[in-house]
Image: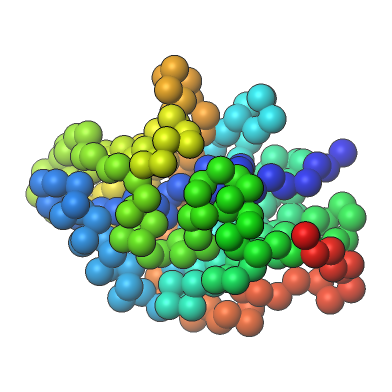
Amino acid sequence: MRKPLKLTSILALCGVLLIPSASAQTAQDIISRVDAAQKAAKDVSFRLSGSASLESSAQKIDLTVKSIPAQNVARLQFNAPDALADNIVVADKNEIRQYLFLTNQVTVMSTKKAADGAGFGGLDFTQLSNAAALLSEYNVKLLSTTGAAGKRLFQLEATPKNGNSTDRTRVYITEAGWRPTRIQIVSSAGKSLADLNVSNYKVNSGLSAAGLKQLPKDAEIIRQ
């Protein structure tokens, strides 16, 4: 049976867009470079696939993420695991609308309330392409740089400044296109909580805010 999608899971899986990329030598330089690149994009879309620990068990993860940075609009659509398949999350600056396929219901919650409830100190995770704003809440360091110039791969690690979580988000960035290729979330004990690959990464593909926000019109609306 399909279970409701939890905001904590969404936040963890969307950690990809918290992290920057560039050819710089410090984390702050990298943040500045990726922020400039992301602001230049009219829209961003990609696929996340791999595995993650949801409700204490490792499960297959497969979802698409679409975002319009300038309008703070994002859409997440799940293909796997089975418990989340066909569920959709639509978020903007003010609210999060979570569509549950099994019940044909849309749960509506303010963005701040959702972030606070997930323990992220009010972080507006819907600003998926505003790396500088998001990373202001995190301590970020550059762990390693590998490869030749033009094809370098950067590994960064981010931990929350507020101390509400000791989990670490590690992101691999390719210099070719300045985009993430892999995301790992690791617990303080070193346990892998998520290991996801990024594919089908596209920018400026003509996405519209109306299209990203579209949900079944016959769904029951529940406000929290």
Residue 26 location (% of width, % of height): 14, 46
- Which one is in front, 138 or 103? 138
Residue 12 location (% of width, % of height): 53, 43
- Which one is in front, 199 or 173? 173
Quarter of the rendering containing residue 208: bottom right
Q: Residue at x 51, y 33 (%)?
A: 194
Residue 65 location (% of width, % of height): 54, 59
Horizontally, residue 119 falls left or right of residue 77, namely left
Q: Quadrant of the N terminus?
A: top right
Q: Quadrant of the C terminus?
A: bottom right
Quarter of the rendering containing residue 8: top right
- Which one is in front, 89 or 188? 188
Horizontally, residue 122 falls left or right of residue 168, namely right
Q: Residue at x 24, y 56 (%)?
A: 31
On screen, 213 above or below 90? below
Horizontally, residue 95 falls left or right of residue 85, namely left
